[in-house]
């Protein structure tokens, strides 16, 4: 994946992020009172129930507690590229071991993330995942209950407190810090290509997880997270292709390192 590196192009991306602030919720999805249209609710519930049946129907005691419509499409900072986030809240999964259940749901989410074809609504791809009730706060800020037909957490409308130029400057600092860190790691040559060795790939992976978790901590602790600098730095990292390209390289390096380790044992 190519990384946008030209400063003018990066500034355009930052300006687009800051400019995508609307006076009302997306009219294709919400009425003037901020409630989802009935046909949208029906479509989303159909998608969610299909995903549930395909993945958890073999757990006879499992129950759907709620289905949440969340993400940037549930706020005032949506754009033409915004995804729709659907979270299926489940409980009573057997066995009643929270660690096993959390691991199971994490593996299912990882599998769902590899699906290249996704349903769309008005051109917006639908992402879906499974959550336990205890995980809602850390994964969803603005979210609407499709089963109870109400906002559990309504979106906040306000203005960005920073400029596109400030966002770009902080983004460049974040990228440089990672690149400086990367230079301290160990690389190996394999078939005329350079990769991180196994230990370095693990370290780099933790660094990228820290960047992502910092953004999601802003989501968790700041009611106005969509407007926070921390979260929008991460959004710009994703828009520029930097985050995905580095994450893919780290995963490739780790998998290669693990394979070479097993081969040489």
Image (spheres, rainbow, N blue to C red):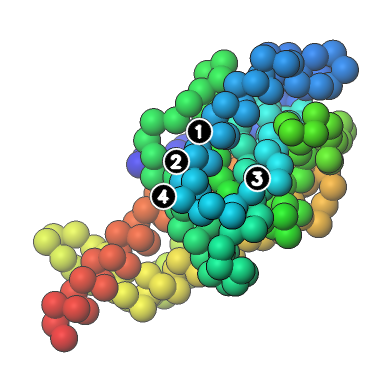
Residue at the farthest front position: 60
Vertical placement of residue 57 versus 98, above or below: above
Q: In the visual, does 186 lie left or right of 16?
A: left
Distance of mark 3 from mark 1, alpha carbons? 12 Å
Quadrant for residue 199, please give it: bottom left
**Residue 209 visible in the current orientation:** no
- Is disc 2 in contact with disc 1, using a CB cutoff of under 8 Å? yes
Question: If you read the primary sequence from the N terminus, does the residue marked by circle 4 or circle 1 appear first?
Answer: 1
> Mark 4 packing: few (<14 Cα in 10 Å), some, or many (20+)?
few
Look at 82% across and 52% down and name the residue there. Answer: 222
> Mark 2 packing: few (<14 Cα in 10 Å), some, or many (20+)?
few
Q: What number of labels is visible?
A: 4
Q: In the visual, does 155 lie left or right of 257?
A: right
Distance of mark 4 from mark 3, alpha carbons? 20 Å
For disc 3, the marked residue is 64
> Mark 3 packing: few (<14 Cα in 10 Å), some, or many (20+)?
some
- Is disc 3 in contact with disc 1, using a CB cutoff of under 8 Å? no
Quick one: SS at disc 1? helix
Distance of mark 4 from mark 1, alpha carbons? 15 Å
Q: In the visual, does 4 lie left or right of 190?
A: right
Front position among marks 2 and 4: 2
Look at 35% across and 41% down and name the residue there. Answer: 1
Question: If you read the primary sequence from the N terminus, does the residue marked by circle 2 or circle 4 appear first?
Answer: 2
Question: If you read the primary sequence from the N terminus, does the residue marked by circle 2 or circle 3 appear first?
Answer: 2
For disc 4, the marked residue is 111
For disc 2, the marked residue is 54
**Residue 97 visible in the current orientation:** yes
- Is disc 2 in contact with disc 3, using a CB cutoff of under 8 Å? no
For disc 1, the marked residue is 50
Look at 59% across and 55% down and name the residue there. Answer: 61
Q: Which percent across, then down, holds residue 223?
A: 84, 47
């Amino acid at each position: 994946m190519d990384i946008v590196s030209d400063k003018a192009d990066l500034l355009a991306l930052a300006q687009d992020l800051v400019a995508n602030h609307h006076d009302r919720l997306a009219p294709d999805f919400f009425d003037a009172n901020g409630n989802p249209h009935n046909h949208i609710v029906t479509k989303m519930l159909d998608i969610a129930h299909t995903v549930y049946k395909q993945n958890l129907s073999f757990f006879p005691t499992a129950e759907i507690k709620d289905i949440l419509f969340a993400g940037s499409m549930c706020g005032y900072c949506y754009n033409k590229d915004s995804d729709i986030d659907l979270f299926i809240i489940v409980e009573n999964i057997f066995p009643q071991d929270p660690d096993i259940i959390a691991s199971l749901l994490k593996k299912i989410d990882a599998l769902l993330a590899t699906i290249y074809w996704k349903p769309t609504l008005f051109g917006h791809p639908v992402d879906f995942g499974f959550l336990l009730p205890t995980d809602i706060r850390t994964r969803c800020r603005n979210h609407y209950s499709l089963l109870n037909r109400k906002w559990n957490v309504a979106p906040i409308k306000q203005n960005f407190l920073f400029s596109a130029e400030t966002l770009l400057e902080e983004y460049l600092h974040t990228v440089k810090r990672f690149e400086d860190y990367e230079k301290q790691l160990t690389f190996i040559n394999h078939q005329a290509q350079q990769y991180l060795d196994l230990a370095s790939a693990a370290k780099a992976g933790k660094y990228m997880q820290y960047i992502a978790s910092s953004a999601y901590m802003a989501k968790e602790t700041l009611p106005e997270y969509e407007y926070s600098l921390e979260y929008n730095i991460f959004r710009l990292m994703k828009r520029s292709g930097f985050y995905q390209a580095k994450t893919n390289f780290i995963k490739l390096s780790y998998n290669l390192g693990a394979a070479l380790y097993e081969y040489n044992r």
